[in-house]
Image: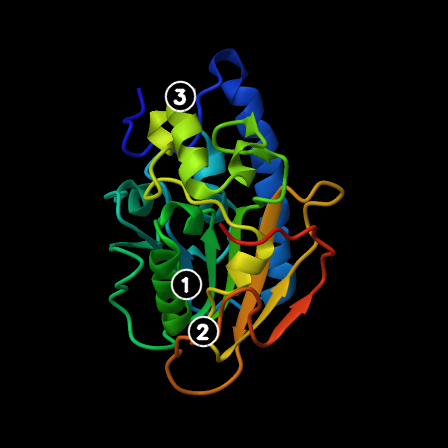
Amino acid sequence: MLSQEWKYTTHLGALERFKNDLVYRLRKRVFDAFMREFRPGAEARVADFGVSTHRYHPVHYYFETLYPHKDRLTALGREGSYWYEEVFPGLKYVNCDLRSIPFPDDYFDFGLCSDVIEHAGSRAEQRALVEEVCRTCRNVLFTAPNRSFPIETHTFVPFLHWLPGREFRLLLQACGLRTFASEAMLNPLDGTTLLSLFPRNRENTLLRVTRPLPIKLICVSRMTTGGPPRRNPHASGEAQGISLKENFNLQGSQ
């Protein structure tokens, strides 16, 4: 049985396998976008930022399964998922908080941060995570569930996540979904909010990968200037250096 601490979505009982199979197909499209956008060579240093400890379905370790150059792949997480090195020979696992990554600036050439940001806590904590990932990696593909989509994909409850944060969490508690009623566990983002988290020296592009339904935000972030990332003091509703490939119906942040 999954621990409550690391239970990321509502368990659907007999439909759980079906749900995971569908999500795996979606994440395979994310992997294809990663390879298409970055075209990493065999010698490129690649990181998967925020791996899961769960082993019961490949949806939780899809990138490690699909990426061909495992001897150049580093998986980073804070759940003690040391089994990755056994299952994927050549891969290196590093246990760490993604707001304090033990690698120097620009160490990785390419990286993936898949469905992690919404679990990082407050907007300030989410920004700290994004900035630290960007500090260590020149090119990163970030994903997160799209708050503008009418169904919240962790709880499978429609529309409640469009409410202000306090009301959203109170209603989750009333529905018996206490695991997800904490901001530290679930803090949904729309596209505008995601883009506002990036430091100034990045060029960020939202990709249209999950059409026709904008279930997931997929953002490619590339470093544009030298030096360590700096927080953008003006980031709020709009971020700097942004181009859009998706005509999302973007809602304002909470």
Position of residue 99 relative to residue 60, above or below, is below
Instruction: Name the amino acid, label 3.
Output: Ala
Residue type beneath disc 1: Val
Badge 2 vs badge 1, beta-carbon distance below 8 Å: yes
Between marks 3 and 2, how big is the CA–CA gap? 37 Å
Q: Name the residue under label 2.
A: 199
If the image is split into quadrants, where does the N terminus sit?
Answer: top left
User: Whole-percent x and y of residue 155?
Assistant: 48, 28
| Disc nearer the start of the sequence (3/1) | 1
Name the residue: 27% across, 27% down: 3
Q: For the residues labelled 3 and 2, say whether their Cβ atoms are less than 8 Å apart.
A: no
Residue 174's disc is 3
CA separation, marks 3 and 1?
32 Å
Q: Give the numbered dot on residue 7.
A: none
Determine whether, in the image, residue 64 is placed left or right of residue 28: left
Q: Which of marks 3 and 2 is in front?
A: 3
Residue 190 point in image, percent of width and height: 56, 51
Q: Residues within 10 Å of mark 1 (few under 14, many from 20)?
A: many
Which of the two discs, 2 and 1, labels the residue nearer the N terminus?
1
Instruction: Give the residue furthest to the bottom.
Output: 226
Say what secondary structure mark 1 lies in.
Answer: helix
Which callout, 3 or 1, points to the residue nearer the camera? 3
Q: Residue at x 36, y 71 (%)?
A: 136
Residue identifier under label 1: 130
Vertical relation: 130 (above or below) 253: below
The answer to whether marks 3 and 1 mark residues whose Cβ atoms lie closer than 8 Å is no
Q: Nearer the viewer, residue 61 or 85?
A: 61
SS at badge 2: loop
Q: Is residue 185 above or below residue 220?
A: above
* Rendered location of residue 123, percent (x, y): 39, 56
Q: Which residue is painted at 39% across and 62% down in the image? A: 127
Rendering coords of residue 58 (x, y %): 47, 35
